[in-house]
């Protein structure tokens, strides 16, 4: 709400998960070497396959062990049942690739790095989706509440598709002429096509709140042609822009937005705890 880079906050959380995972993988590999010896890779896979009940970490480990994520394996047409054959073929490939070099320990270290690389893709992808959705929903509720709108009276969040509208929406805001849609896409400059897609979804007077776009973008022209309000968060005053847009559209009083860092912090701290909590189905 102060126009800063929120990603720097969430990045520390993601890096913490990665570092703990790397330590865990190091322990897994070292323990497997002690227990299974030179065949630690294939024997560890066999051990995981034989387990009747696997937790999420063990399920992921099966794919990481062959340098894949579950999503990548689907794209490649590889099932869990295929993984024992996959690791045998990968082991043969590695032996052919490095068989003439006396670097067995280094090859094992390279294998561990391959596993860590797969874990990185997995965790970053999961965090981007989960944390991003949570922040988007908090942001909508917080922004509109700070501006004086009441949830389920003046705005509705997390709108599901129904017989009337076939696309879900992050929020709908009550106006004099019905409801307008609001979408949040915390997209950076490299993925502006996501913001472009939302322009056609929100309709006239709809609002799209996003992180930032590149300097050469033409999405503002597209939004103007559709009568859509784009609100950039980074290096901007999103509360002021949203207030300025919805004020002439509604027939109920709304609150002037805070503009200083001190006032914004005070307003956020005064928000009810319910703004920051979700039902399990929402996340």
Image: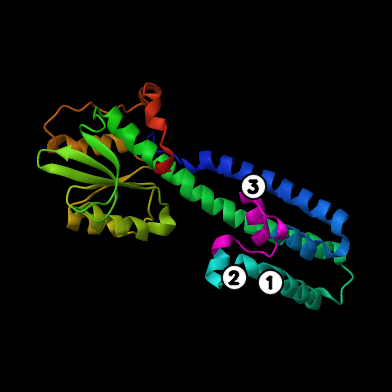
Residue at disc 1, secondary structure: helix
Gap between marks 1 and 2 measured at Cα: 8 Å
In the image, taking residue 49 as reference, residue 77 lies left or right, namely: left
Q: Is residue 281 above or below residue 86?
A: above
Report whether residue 216 is seen: no
Q: Earlier in the sequence, mark 1 or mark 3?
A: 3
Which residue shows up at 63% across the image and 41% down it?
16
Q: Which residue is mark 1?
A: 86
Give the quarter of the image for residue 73.
bottom right
In the image, taking residue 127 as reference, residue 171 lies left or right, namely: left
Label 1 with label 2: CB-CB less than 8 Å = yes
Disc 3: CA contacts within 10 A as few (<14), some (14-19) or many (>=20): some
Q: Which residue is mark 3?
A: 18
Q: Earlier in the sequence, mark 3 or mark 2?
A: 3
Q: Is residue 148 above or below residue 127?
A: above
Gap between marks 1 and 3 measured at Cα: 25 Å
Residue 250 belongs to the span the image colors magenta? no
Q: Earlier in the sequence, mark 1 or mark 2?
A: 2
Q: Is residue 110 above or below residue 20?
A: below
Which residue shows up at 31% across the image and 38% down it?
238
In the image, taking residue 28 as reference, residue 8 lies left or right, namely: left
Q: What are the residue bounds of the magenta stretch? A: 50-71
Residue at disc 3, secondary structure: helix
Report whether residue 127 is seen: yes
- Number of the front mark, 1 or 3: 1
**Residue 78: mark in rendering:** 2
Residue 26: % across, % down: 77, 51
Which residue shows up at 52% across the image and 38% down it?
9
């Amino acid at each position: 709400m102060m126009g800063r880079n929120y990603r720097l906050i969430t990045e520390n959380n993601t890096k913490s998960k990665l570092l703990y995972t790397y330590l865990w993988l190091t322990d897994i590999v070292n323990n497997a070497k002690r227990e299974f010896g030179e065949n630690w890779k294939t024997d560890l896979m066999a051990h995981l396959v034989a387990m009747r009940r696997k937790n999420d970490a063990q399920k992921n480990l099966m794919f990481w062990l062959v340098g894949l994520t579950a999503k990548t394996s689907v794209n490649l047409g590889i099932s869990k049942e295929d993984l024992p054959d996959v690791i045998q073929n990968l082991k043969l490939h590695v032996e052919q690739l490095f068989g003439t070099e006396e670097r067995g320990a280094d090859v094992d270290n390279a294998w561990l790095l391959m596993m860590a690389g797969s874990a990185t893709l997995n965790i970053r992808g999961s965090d981007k989706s989960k944390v991003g959705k949570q922040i988007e929903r908090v942001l909508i509720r917080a922004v509109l509440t700070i501006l004086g709108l009441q949830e389920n009276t003046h705005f509705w969040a997390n709108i599901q598709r129904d017989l009337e509208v076939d696309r879900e929406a992050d929020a709908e805001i009550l106006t004099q002429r019905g409801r307008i849609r609001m979408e949040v896409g915390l997209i950076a400059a490299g993925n502006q096509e996501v913001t472009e897609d939302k322009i056609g979804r929100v309709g006239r007077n709809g609002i799209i709140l996003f992180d930032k776009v590149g300097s050469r973008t033409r999405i503002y022209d597209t939004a103007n042609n559709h009568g859509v309000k784009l609100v950039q968060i980074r290096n901007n005053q999103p509360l002021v822009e949203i207030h300025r847009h919805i004020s002439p559209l509604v027939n109920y009083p709304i609150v002037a937005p805070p503009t200083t860092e001190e006032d914004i912090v005070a307003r956020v701290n005064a928000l009810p705890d319910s703004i920051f909590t979700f039902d399990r189905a929402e996340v």
